[in-house]
Image: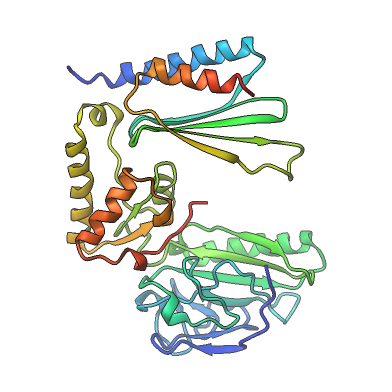
Amino acid sequence: MKIDRDATIKKHFDMLHTLTNRLNGDRLSVFSHSYNYLSFGNWEIVIGSGHKEKKFFWDGRDFNLTVSERNKTNLCQNNQWSNVNHIPLGEISDEELFERVYQIAVQI
Amino acid sequence: MQELSKPTAWLENVTGLKLQNNQAYIPSVPGPGSYSGTNYSGGSGKKLIDAPDVLTLNGSGYSSRRGGDGVGVGFGSAIGGYSLLGNDLISSSPLTTNISESVGGNYSGMSGFENWWGNFSAEVQRDLPAMGPFVPLMGQAASGVYGAVKLGLGVGAYSSGNSMVLGRVGSYERLADQLGAKKFTIPRDVWAKMSLPERRSANFRSIDRSIKRGDSFIFSNQPSEAYPGSGFAAEIQYLRSKGINTDDIPVISPW
């Protein structure tokens, strides 16, 4: 099958858009996001509510989802990411991956 | 950050570079603790860029005893385990030409230090365009003396693309971009179409090319942080199979 770079990139952002909308219904927000198609399609999304945040990092090279969290009480304290959890997911679809992110995020 | 109490002068016996504190920053005057053009000049007159070793401050603040506008200048690398407080340089430092510089001064407050730092940064960047990334790391010692460390990553092997960064996904790409070094990346769709053996082969080929070119390697993570079965773990194994001692590869965290 022919590679369609633009379709792949668009799909990622569509999935992110859908995720953002779903999370809004749970009073959660996507605070930051980065995506690198050229580097295995790695991405990072920070989702939070108030002072609680979870960071999701997708390692598209080894197919691991890394989840970490932090509580922000102010700008200086407790801002380190902790409880880092590496979840090997294998080569799953974008739909499955974003569903996994959603399910973890709503536990915030 | 800690204020350095010794040595006031120190001679590295391999490179012949002399490190002194309490030296003023004098861009136009080569010598201990000063710059010479785009290269550093040690007490022996040797250029640090040619040195087979590094002097490492390892993030420690170096504060001048001169106070005021006196600036102590040292040489070092952010890599190794050498501390100016007495560890053996030779046994702890990897072979590299990376250098960093540590400077500091006595100021009455953080705002004074920041003003000085801003001026100093501008001066160094003007005089030493080859210095590359300019990364001030500031901290306050218990004594109230502020120190700063600048990584001179633009000088030497790391800046000219003749090094390759390996590590865990998420950090090695970032460090490679920061250093201007090589990295192994493949677009997502291409990666998705490759089998595991093809992926490993592509990865190893990139390492082979770097070895053939004589590139140096840098880790963005400790080898112990490699997940079993991960690309980073495979890279470490491959390097070892090529006779490369991975313990000698410097580890630098992206900033």
Give the quadrant of residue B120: bottom right
In the foreground, A39 or B19: A39
In the foreground, B93 or B197: B197
Asked whether, in this view, residue B179 is left or right of residue B11, the answer is left
Which residue appears at 42% of the width and 74% of the height?
Answer: B93
Asked whether, in this view, residue B202 is left or right of residue B236, the answer is left
- Count the numbered circles shown: 0
Q: Quarter holding the N terminus of chain B?
A: bottom right
Which residue appears at 33% of the width and 48% of the height?
Answer: B232
Which residue appears at 35% of the width and 45% of the height?
Answer: B228
The percent coordinates of residue A104 (x first, y second) are: 55, 23
Report the residue that reaches farthest toward the front.
B228
The percent coordinates of residue A90 (x first, y second) are: 34, 28
Give the quadrant of residue B247: bottom left
Asked whether, in this view, residue B244 is left or right of residue A85, the answer is left
The percent coordinates of residue B55 (x first, y second) are: 48, 77
Which residue appears at 17% of the width and 43% of the height?
Answer: B201
> Considering only vertical position in the picture, is B247 above or below B200?
below
Give the quadrant of residue B153: bottom left
The percent coordinates of residue B185 (x first, y second) are: 30, 40
Residue A5 visible in the picture? yes
In the foreground, A78 or A41: A78
> Considering only vertical position in the picture, is B245 above or below A19?
below
Residue B220 visible in the picture? no
